């Protein structure tokens, strides 16, 4: 839904908030202002200007703080800027606000994958798939995560074997560190 504001900031086309009793034409209506900023952020994102998109969406949340779609879009923007921890944080808020929205779960899964939390990512993909079983994007990415986890299992097995073969405390400590570090996948998804 798109709104068009004239120079005098009067609402010409109003969003459908039929359940609200408020006067939607009022210039300071928080829902209308939030929607305007949300749409402005979408326009920036479409132009690949993620910094300004994030600024608009953050401003939007000052007026309506429970809009899961804004948090989900922020997570995507953070992912494109490779600010993966902020992406996880925003995606988690989106999921908490809309737990049965598969797109929010998918974005959370991607963000978790990017910080190397492959097992958490797999769980999020599975939940997204249970919500939207016909979504081929989820199916494809879940299969990719399965392959990564298979490779990680091989690494873990190798590290456990080396740990069991360790004869001196220093070797044992080194192998234990390698085992713990290998529980995380590098953000690139490439395993060595």
Image: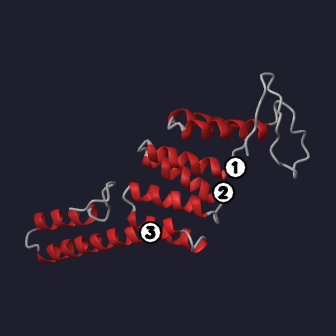
As measured in the structure, the alpha-carbon distance from the residue carrying label 3 to the one carrying label 1 is 30 Å
Answer few, some or many: residues within 10 Å of disc 2's Cα (few below 14, many 20 plus, some between 14 and 19). Answer: some
- Disc 1 + disc 2, Cβ < 8 Å: yes
Q: Quadrant of residue 115?
A: bottom left
Residue pushed farthest top? Answer: 7
Q: Which residue is mark 3?
A: 140
Question: If you read the primary sequence from the N terminus, does the residue marked by circle 3 or circle 1 appear first?
Answer: 1
Answer few, some or many: residues within 10 Å of disc 1's Cα (few below 14, many 20 plus, some between 14 and 19). Answer: some
- Disc 3 + disc 1, Cβ < 8 Å: no
The numbered mark at residue 66 is 1
As measured in the structure, the alpha-carbon distance from the residue carrying label 1 to the one carrying label 2 is 7 Å
Is 13 above or below relative to 96?
A: above
Q: Position of residue 20 (x, y in %)?
A: 87, 48
Residue 71 falls left or right of residue 110: right
Q: Check the picture and name the quadrant holding the C terminus.
A: bottom left
Q: Quadrant of residue 99?
A: bottom right
For the residue labelled by badge 1, is the local secondary structure a helix, a strand or a loop?
Answer: loop
Residue pictured at 53% horizontal, 36% vertical? 47
Is 2 above or below relative to 99?
A: above
Taking depth in this image into account, of 24 and 66 the one nearest to the observer is 24
Q: Position of residue 54 (x, y in %)?
A: 56, 38
Q: Position of residue 21 (x, y in %)?
A: 91, 46
Q: Which residue is mark 2?
A: 97
Taking depth in this image into account, of 5 and 153 the one nearest to the observer is 5
Residue pictured at 58% horizontal, 58% vertical? 104
Q: Position of residue 129 (x, y in %)?
A: 54, 71
For the residue labelled by badge 3, is the local secondary structure a helix, a strand or a loop?
Answer: helix
């Amino acid at each position: 839904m798109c709104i068009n504001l004239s120079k005098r900031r009067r609402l010409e086309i109003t969003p459908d908030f039929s359940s609200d009793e408020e006067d939607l034409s009022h210039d300071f209506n928080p829902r209308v202002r939030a929607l305007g900023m949300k749409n402005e952020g979408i326009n920036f994102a479409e132009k690949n200007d993620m910094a300004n998109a994030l600024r608009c969406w953050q401003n939007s949340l000052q007026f309506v703080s429970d809009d899961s779609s804004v948090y989900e879009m922020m997570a995507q923007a953070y992912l494109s800027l490779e600010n993966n921890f902020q992406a996880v944080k925003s995606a988690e808020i989106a999921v908490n606000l809309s737990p049965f929205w598969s797109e929010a779960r998918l974005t959370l899964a991607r963000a978790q994958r990017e910080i190397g939390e492959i097992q958490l990512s797999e769980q999020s993909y599975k939940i997204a798939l249970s919500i939207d079983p016909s979504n081929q994007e989820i199916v494809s990415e879940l299969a990719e995560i399965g392959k990564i986890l298979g490779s990680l299992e091989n690494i873990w097995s190798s590290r456990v074997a080396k740990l069991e073969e360790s004869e001196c405390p220093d070797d044992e400590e080194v192998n234990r560190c390698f085992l713990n570090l290998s529980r995380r996948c590098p953000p690139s998804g490439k395993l060595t």
